[in-house]
Image (spheres, rainbow, N blue to C red):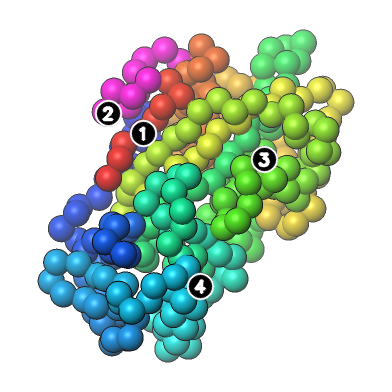
Amino acid sequence: MAYADHIKALNSWNPDNFLPFVVDGIEVGRIRHDFADQLAGFHDCFVVNDKQVLLHSQLTGFEQRSDAVATVLSSLAESGAVTHLMGEMFPVLEAFGKPALLQIDRASVSQFGIRAFGQHLNGYVQTSDGLAMWIARRASDRRAFPGKLDQLVAGGLPYAISLAENLAKECREEADIPPELAAAAEYVGQISYCCEVAKGVRHDTIFCYDLLLPESFSPRCTDGEVESFALMPIEKVAEIVRDTEDFKPNCNLVVIDFLQRHGFIEADLNPHNATAGQIQVEC
């Protein structure tokens, strides 16, 4: 393994495997051909041809579009074509800050290949022995990446919640970080990647934060997502990322970005020559 291998792994996809997903004339995602064939059976919601998947033009507003797609996904979940639904809604939009055209269940984000957004927080400590970072280990019962290493705090950004509100919520739920301490988190940039996964394509942007924590702080998970925490010397964290696949894949990129910005690695590791704090390859 090498740092660059993790970056390349999350920036690999073949456009020929997908059809554009278009809502109100705006391309908002990519859909695998076999899933498009399944959607073609729902004529009141989707119009599918050999060039694209269109949300039906008769669906004209946020609520109407959202309800129609939710009905389709519920039907597909009952038939087993969709494995599960989470009940957490993500916005479908052209770009961050643009109005949401509809909302969709988080579990179906990759099947529709829509832009998804999340927040990851590097919790680090300046100890007498040098810089150390709090690392979480995901619970073994998680549907996604059980047992993998993770940032101290990490979560998706659902519909209709601000970045500040969501970060405070995730800090409280995942690491029991009090609001006054969470408010000291520093936004340091964003990471974007696009890669094929089993269900479809992940087209994600992670908003990254650094939080310098006091040595007296110890995290505690309150929502069951994490089974344990470890305070590791930053050199050990770097070694794990460089030499293994122990971290959840997108967490590798967040750590690499931290290492670059804090001067622990200097090489330009991005295959598309992005600078530190801007690990980004767009679809």
Q: CA distance from mark 2 to mark 4?
A: 41 Å
Closer to the eye: label 1 or 2: 1
Q: Position of residue 69 (x, y in %)?
A: 43, 76
Q: CA distance from mark 1 to mark 2?
A: 10 Å
Which residue lies most toward the right here?
Answer: 216
The x, y position of residue 239, in whole percent, is 51, 26
Q: Secondary structure at mark 1?
A: loop
Whether the magenta-drawn stretch holds residue 136 is answered as: no
Tell me the magenta residue range: 265-275
Amino acid tagged 4? Glu
The structure residue drawn at horizontal position 14% and vertical position 66%, both measured from the top left corner, is: 51
**Label number found at residue 271:** 2
The secondary element bearing badge 4 is classed as helix
The earlier-in-sequence mark between 3 and 4 is 4
Q: For the C terminus, give its image quadrant.
A: top left
Q: Predominant secondary structure in magenta?
A: loop
Q: Residues within 10 Å of mark 3 (few under 14, many from 20)?
A: few
Q: Which residue is under mark 3?
A: 164
Amino acid type indicated by mark 2? Pro
Location of residue 24 with respect to 247 vertically, above or below = below
Label 1 sits on residue: 280
In this view, the residue in front, 107 or 114, is: 114
Residue behind mark 4: 63
